[in-house]
Amino acid sequence: MTKKTTVVLGFLGSVLDYGGKESSRWDKWRPNLALCRFEDLLIHRLELFHENRIATTTHILCEDIIGVSPETKIHTHILKIQDPWDFEEVYGKLLDYVRQYPFDTEKEDYFVHITTGTHVEQICLYLLTETHYIPARLIQTSPPSRRRPDQEGQYRIIDLDLSKYDLIMQRIHQEQKDSVSFLKSGIDTKNLRFNHLIDQIEHVSLHSHEPILLTGPTGSGKSRLARRIYQLKKSKWQAKGELVEVNCATLKGDNAMSTLFGHIKGAFTGAIQNRSGLLRRADGGLLFLDEIGELGLDEQAMLLRAVEEKTFLPMGADKEVQSNFQLIVGTNRSLQDEVVKGQFREDLLARIDLWTFELPGLKDRREDIEPNIYYELEQIAEQQGGKISFHSRALESFLTFAISHDAIWKANFRDLNAAIKRMTTFAHNGRITLPVVQDEIERLKKSWSNGDPDDHSDVLEGLISSERLSEIDLFDQIQLREVVKVCQKAKSLAEAGKILFSESRVRKKNQNDTDRLRKYLKRFDVVISG
Amino acid sequence: MITIDGSYGEGGGQILRTSLALSLITREPFNITHIRAKRRKPGLMRQHLTAVQAASAIGKARVEGLELGSTNLTFVPEQLKGGKYRFSIGTAGSTTLILQTVLPALLLADQPSQLTLEGGTHNPLAPPYHFIEKAFLPLMRRMGAEITMELERPGFYPAGGGVFHVTIQPCKDLKGLELMERGEVKQRSVLGLLSQLPFHIIEREFQELKRRLNWEKDCFKPLMCESKGPGNVLIAELVCENVTEVFTTFGEKNKRAETVASSLVKMIRRYLSSEAALGEYLADQILLPMVLAGKGAFTTLKPSGHTLTNIHVIRKFLSVSIDLTEIDEDRTIIRIQD
């Protein structure tokens, strides 16, 4: 016969399998006996576990099983369990047993009988099966119903391999699809490479706590993806803490160390209070470090330790603190190149390079421009409370340009987002017309031909409307950009003021630099908080 | 290859066993489909696996589809081999069903056979040991077969664990029998088997039997037996001029002793009120040996579903003529001719 040998592993039920010595034991439902009596289930070998000594009732049970099932061989094993309700002990003893058990899934088919034994023993058997230490399916027996007491009851086989269940798999696939769709912000993207990438990220996000490295050109959506990953994990109860985002380009000097790892009072001049730091704040949550290539070497060393050991030393502290966070890092540079240049630690790269996902730029996924346009329009509609749409010819014209090779989308989604924002601003009665589109196309072409993409709308983006910007002289624009850059790098407006007016403030009686800076920005309707 | 539709008739396990027996006798391979199609759990169950394994052991057969739940089986016997065999059967399966499958073929083997059968010997769903020994075997002897049986230990449902031994001498020329009338009842008795149960059960059963049957006192014999589990069986034996009939009822949990006795009375009365020589179970058992003899006739009560199914399968394997003539509601003549 080519059929596999059927083997059952399970506990001898000290109560249920006990029937006494009298013939009345045949009136009792004894699970291990019933298991061997089913007409449609043939058990070739029964591995029966005992907690301690083998009582005479065990011999009776074994004799009875042989009588009703001469095909079954019974092996009894004493596990020497002192306390059958002690999880640690039971799990340990069972693990020792199954580790030495010569499982041969080619020749044998295994079942774990979980009807007998203490609940703790049943749980341990379940766990060992679920984690594949025992390559088995579960089997459960139940007593006969009152209406048919002559029967041996029922048995059910439970396969923990969920792929065997159609309805469950349908749900899992649907949930997976939902998660993928969630990561894509509900945008129905068409690009195969991007979709495949998101499928992988979905899986990794939900199955791994290891660092994730997101690479890709500026504006390819790294920050947005990091935020979605966090929200996805949170919705699946996989992230308890918060999402902490920081751009490493903004971290310089002592400030960098202190911002990330915290300091204790008096650690350095100006450290007047304890500061816990961002890593501590990300405990139980997710830390997103964008532009990781900008991080200093000292901070890199500390970060590596924090990732590996889940502990680090705040500045000035003599005691390490703990923080367990998942790290996601973003970079638009090649970290390998940085390693060669000595700007990035090789060991840190090795640690964060486990899951690397390269987000393609917009020009490499032109088929996704159209769904992203609709997404941006919806976002704007939500913010402004009014639906804005394209005239059909206007849309056609914009799309033709957007997917053409004239459109290089230098700053990727940032460019697309800005373009849509500008066009909606110029929309008439909620409709974007052909002339508006034509102007925008010209504007985009011009900005891309200027070379440096960082030089333009980037800094003022979001702070000032393009309409207002067009009213400002280039002379003033240049100054404004530099001022805003300083403000964004500083921790507060006060600090920015000190930097910007560092020469003149010495001579001033009234040193309210913050107010001076605020007033300057107000002239251009720019508001920076802090 | 002969093909059998397992869903024919009552669509149970009997059609498979009869096919196995006939395939061993004729050395004709067969394929059976829709095995036990009309049962709640269709396909091969454990007791059928054991039957097929026993048949393939004595017929050195090649078997395909031999697994639990299989509804399609091919059986190709290579060589019929008498000798020593031991067959064990578990669950509710009965040893006598295994015997029924292999016995006719072993009569045709080239050497004597000694069988040891382990499992249930007295089971409500199969011919009990005492029926085979006291009713079936005497007829076989009269046909020329040398068969002896010995019960080592009875096995009752649910504990099983019974053992009996059978020796079979080869017999190439079975003689046909004419059993048209049973003749006068010469001897009558009831044997009450009891194992691991209180004696008052038998007392109450016998009391009821005495009251209803009005037989002499010494007709009732209790037999305390050694068995693996509890059991209670009533076996009535009617020795008539031309035939001995045996009827059996089983004590069960939650069934009154008086009810067990009363169903035995009903079976005896039904047989005695008819003119038929054989009861339906005996008719069913003797049919195949009669076919092997090539001729014979008997009267029986209304033919059972099993008998009709057996006739259907026999006709698939052998070109023998089997005629059924109904005389009245309780009597049919079955005649076998080459």
Image: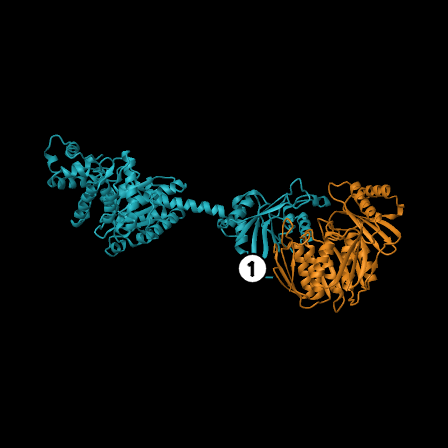
Chain colours: A cyan, B orange
Q: Position of residue A166 (x, y in %)?
A: 49, 48
Q: Is residue A505 visible?
A: yes
- On the image, numbered disc 1 is attached to which residue? A107
Residue A343 falls left or right of residue A16? left
Q: Position of residue B63 (x, y in %)?
A: 63, 63
* Residue at far bottom of view: B110
Q: Residue at x 12, y 41 (%)?
A: A474
Q: Quadrant of the N terminus of chain A?
A: bottom right
Instruction: Return the chain for callout 1.
Output: A
* Residue at far top of view: A510
What is the three-letter code of the residue carrying label 1?
A: Lys
Along the viewing direction, whichever of B38 and B327 lies nearer the viewer: B327
Q: Give the quarter of the image for residue B44.
A: bottom right
Along the viewing direction, whichever of A80 and A518 lies nearer the viewer: A518
Q: Secondary structure at mark 1?
A: loop
Q: Position of residue B90 (x, y in %)?
A: 68, 54
Q: Is residue A315 visible?
A: no
Q: Position of residue B25 (x, y in %)?
A: 72, 65
Q: Residues within 10 Å of mark 1 (few under 14, many from 20)?
A: few
Along the viewing direction, whichever of A413 and A114 lies nearer the viewer: A413
Q: Quadrant of the C terminus of chain A?
A: top left
Q: Is residue A405 above or below residue A87?
A: below
